[in-house]
C-alpha cells in the first residue's frame, strides 16, 4: 500500500503577492489582466472569492462584482521562485516528487522513515515548513492512491489537511460525487447523470463492460476510481518534452511582412503557458512550425539562450528561414519550446550552427 501526499498552495499567486505586500492581507485582491483590455483573472484570494470571483472570469466582470477589488499584474518569475522553494522543502522528505504545476505536486512517501513513517505527520510538517519559510499556506491531502490524495487536498481548503486512510477508502468513495473524479468535466458529468450515475456507488452498480461501452477507455478508469483504485505511480521525471501554441489564420498570409506581426502575440501566449509549467523545466530549443496553403508543413528549430530578448530574435529568424523554404501562402503558424527536465544541460549555442530545418 502506497502513501501519497498531494500538496496544493492556497490561492497561490494571490498569496505570494500578499506575502510580498502584507498590507493587502485583509483586502479582496486578484492577480490578472487589465479589465480594459479583456484581461482575465488568474486567481484571487479567499476574501475576493466571497464576492463570487474566480479564476478565468473576466477582470471587468470581477470588478463589477467587487468594485474595490485590487487586480495586480502577474509576476511569474516571482511565483516560480516560490515554487522552487516549496519543491526544496518537499525534497527533504522524498525524492519521489511529481510536480503538476507551479503550486501543486504529488509526493510518494511510502518509504520514508521520517516523522515515524507517518504520511499524515509528514504532510503536517511540510505545511508548517512552507509557512515558516514562505509565509504562504498550502493544503495537503493524504491517501493510498494519487487521485484520492488530490481530492483530499481540496477537501478542506484553505490551509487544509485531509487524510483518507486505506481503511477509509471504501466508505469515502461510495457517496463521492462523480464530479470530483479527475477527468469528469461538465460534459461527462451530464452524460453520467443522464444514466442516473451521480456517485461512485452508482458506478459500482454497473459492470466494467458497460462502463467501457459507454465511455471507452475512460470508462475503465471511472470504474476503477469508483472502487478507490488508481495504479498510477509517481512520475518524478517530468516527461513533457515540448510546449507550443499555434494559430490558423482566417486568411492566408502571402509574405513575411504580413506574417511577422503575428509573432508577438504567439510568443506571449507561449510564455504564458510555459510559466505555468513545472518550474524546474528548462527551455532547450526553440521551434517554429509553418503550414502552407497546400497543407505542407515545415518545422525549423534552433538552440535556446537564457536571454528572452535573444530568443525572440531567434524566433523571428526561424520564422523567416522557415518561410524562405517554400515561399508559399501561410495558413498556420506555431511557436514552441523543446524542454529538458533539469537545469544541468548547457543551453546557449549559436543559432547559425544549430539551426536545422525539417520537413514533415
Ligand atoms: P490553482 O491551484 O488551481 O488555484 P489557486 O492556488 O489560486 O487557488 P486554490 O486555493 O483553489 O488552490 O492554480 C494555481 C495558480 O495557477 C493560481 O494561483 C493562478 C494560476 N491559474 C491561472 O493562471 N489560471 C487559471 O484558470 C487557474 C485555475 C489557475
Ligand atoms: Mg492552488
Image (spheres, rainbow, N blue to C red):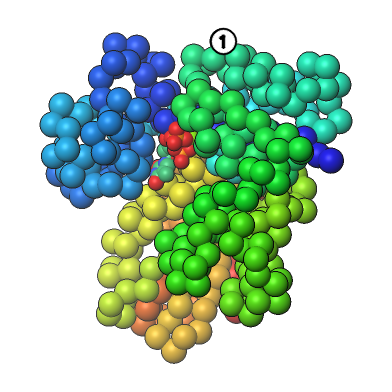
Q: Position of residue 11 (x, y in %)?
A: 42, 30
Residue at image location 60% in from the left, 14% down from the top: 128
Residue 65 position, x and y percent, is 17, 38
Side (left or right) of 216 relative to 103 = right
Ligand 1: image quarter? top left
Residue 203 is left or right of residue 97, and the answer is left
Query: Is 100 rendered above or below residue 161?
Result: below
Q: Residue at x 65, y 56 (%)?
A: 226
The image quadrant where one finds the C terminus is: bottom right
Q: Residue at x 36, y 82 (%)?
A: 329
Secondary structure of residue under mark 1: helix
Q: Residue at x 27, y 80 (%)?
A: 251
Total numbered labels placed on residues in the image = 1
Q: Position of residue 232 (x, y in %)?
A: 75, 52
Q: Quadrant of residue 107?
A: top right
Viewer-closest of 38 and 63: 63
**Do we see residue 103 in this rendering?**
no
- Image quadrant in which you'd find residue 121: top right
Which quarter of the rendered picture does the N terminus lie within?
top right
Camera-side residue of 258 and 208: 208
Q: Nearer the viewer, residue 353 or 34?
A: 34
Q: Is 209 located above or below residue 101 in the figure? A: below
Asked if 147 appears above or below 203 in the picture, the reply is above
Q: Which residue is mark 1?
A: 132
Q: Quadrant of residue 60?
A: top left
Q: Position of residue 81 (x, y in %)?
A: 53, 26
The reply to whether residue 65 is in sight is: yes
Amino acid at each position: 500500500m502506497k502513501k501519497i501526499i498531494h500538496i496544493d498552495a492556497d490561492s497561490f499567486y494571490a498569496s505570494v503577492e500578499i506575502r510580498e505586500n502584507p498590507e493587502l492581507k485583509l483586502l479582496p485582491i486578484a492577480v490578472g489582466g487589465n479589465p480594459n483590455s479583456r484581461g482575465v483573472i488568474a486567481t484571487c484570494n479567499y476574501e475576493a472569492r466571497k464576492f463570487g470571483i474566480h479564476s478565468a472570469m473576466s477582470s471587468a466582470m470581477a470588478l463589477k462584482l467587487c468594485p474595490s477589488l485590487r487586480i495586480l499584474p502577474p509576476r511569474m518569475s516571482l511565483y516560480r521562485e516560490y515554487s522552487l522553494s516549496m519543491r526544496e522543502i518537499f525534497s527533504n522528505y522524498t525524492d519521489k516528487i511529481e510536480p503538476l504545476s507551479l503550486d501543486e505536486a504529488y509526493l510518494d512517501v511510502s518509504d520514508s522513515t521520517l516523522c515515524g513513517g507517518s504520511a499524515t505527520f509528514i504532510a503536517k510538517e511540510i505545511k508548517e515548513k512552507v509557512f515558516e519559510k514562505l509565509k504562504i499556506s498550502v493544503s495537503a491531502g493524504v491517501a493510498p492512491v494519487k487521485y484520492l490524495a488530490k481530492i483530499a487536498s481540496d477537501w478542506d481548503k484553505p490551509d487544509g489537511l485531509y487524510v483518507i486512510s486505506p481503511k477509509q477508502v471504501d466508505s469515502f468513495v461510495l457517496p463521492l460525487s462523480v464530479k470530483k473524479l479527475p477527468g469528469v468535466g461538465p460534459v461527462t458529468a451530464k452524460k453520467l447523470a443522464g444514466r442516473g450515475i451521480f456517485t461512485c456507488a452508482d458506478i459500482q452498480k454497473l459492470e466494467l463492460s458497460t462502463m467501457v461501452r459507454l465511455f471507452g477507455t475512460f470508462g475503465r478508469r471511472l470504474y476503477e476510481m469508483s472502487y478507490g483504485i488508481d495504479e498510477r505511480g509517481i512520475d518524478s521525471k517530468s516527461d513533457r518534452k515540448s510546449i507550443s501554441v499555434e494559430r490558423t489564420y482566417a486568411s492566408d498570409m502571402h509574405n513575411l511582412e504580413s506574417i511577422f506581426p503575428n509573432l508577438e502575440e504567439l510568443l506571449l501566449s507561449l510564455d504564458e503557458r510555459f510559466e505555468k509549467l513545472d518550474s524546474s523545466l528548462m527551455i532547450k530549443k526553440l521551434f517554429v512550425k509553418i503550414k502552407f496553403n497546400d497543407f505542407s508543413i515545415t518545422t525549423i528549430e534552433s538552440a535556446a539562450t537564457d536571454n528572452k530578448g535573444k530568443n525572440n530574435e531567434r524566433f523571428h529568424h526561424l520564422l523567416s528561414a522557415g518561410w524562405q523554404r517554400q515561399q508559399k501562402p501561410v495558413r498556420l503558424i506555431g511557436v514552441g519550446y523543446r524542454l529538458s527536465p533539469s537545469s544541468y544541460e548547457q543551453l546557449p549555442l549559436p543559432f547559425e550552427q544549430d539551426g536545422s530545418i525539417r520537413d514533415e
